[in-house]
Image: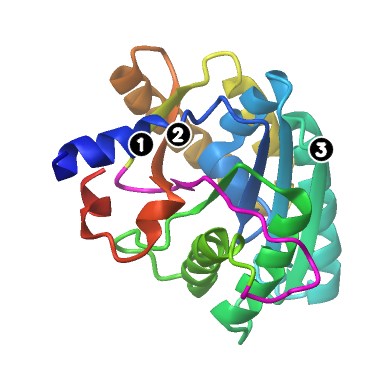
Amino acid sequence: MDITEFVGKVSEDIKLLEHERYLFVSPHPDDAEIGCGATMKKLAGLGKEVYLAVVTDGRKGYSDPSMQEEKVVEIRKQEQLRAARILGVKEIFFLGFEDLGDYRISDVREKLIALMRRVKPDVVFTVDPYLKYEVHPDHIKVGLAAMQASLFSGFPSIPPKDIEPHPVKAVALYLTSSPNTFVCVDAEHESKLAALKEHKSQFSQMWEMIEGYVDYKSREYGKVQGCKRAEGFKVLPTLFLHVFPDADEL
């Protein structure tokens, strides 16, 4: 078997919509909705268990200089809760890391490994930390932490050792420039927009731009998949997250 056959055989085992339990990892309140809100809604509509982990508290996401950060944290939490209800999320986990804080990837990774072992997701969605011009440290650190946690969750030697290991089958990177998998979301697009509108503290002053870009990307991906609207992901089996140079070719 050559490398092309090997990659194809392993990749065919990852049917993105055919699992039972999914964990979406978001750096801030609103990131998951932007990148994959319609897919969240689609999975929930299919009867799948959809969980959301919001890693940072979003305290830096405001433009009013008179606003106190602790008030911003609560506003963004409530916005996230309302958006998640629209998308059918079963449970949200607020990990509470400080937005733009001086936390380490390993700190987030440890929290996510524990969460994955409790939730037992088949597939983990997170932001693509390798997006070429992404400079936000929360996106880079959270994306890497989620990918690392997905790889190590099944290793019994990796702490926390008081929770049974759980192997994650694949990661799906959203907000990526290298999608290899597309999900048709014609029926779920309006729910995605409704969820995004709940993040009023972020988008009320720039809604037309956000709506326009979301519309543009969904139509662009839809053309690839043969439907009106779609969302795109870089899907990688966890087997390909370590010492596998050909992962870039998937």
Question: Contact, CB < 8 Å: mark 2 with mark 1?
Answer: yes
Tell me the element at label 2. loop
Residue 45 image offset from top left, x and y in percent: 70, 19
Decide: is 222 above or below 111.
above
Q: Which residue is mark 2?
A: 14
Residue under numbered circle 1: 11
Residue 111 visible to an observer of this rendering: yes
Quadrant assignment for the N terminus: top left
Alpha carbons under labels 2 and 1: distance apart: 5 Å
> As shown in the figure, which amino acid type bears the numbered disc 3?
Lys
For the residue carrying disc 2, how many other residues have a C-alpha within 10 Å: few (<14), some (14-19), or many (20+)? some
Residue 87, compared with residue 110, is above or below; it is above
Residue position marked by numbered label 3 in the rendering: 90
| Numbered range of the magenta stretch | 157-178
Judging from the image, what secondary structure is the residue with disc 1 in?
Answer: helix
Front residue of this view, candidates 119 and 219: 119
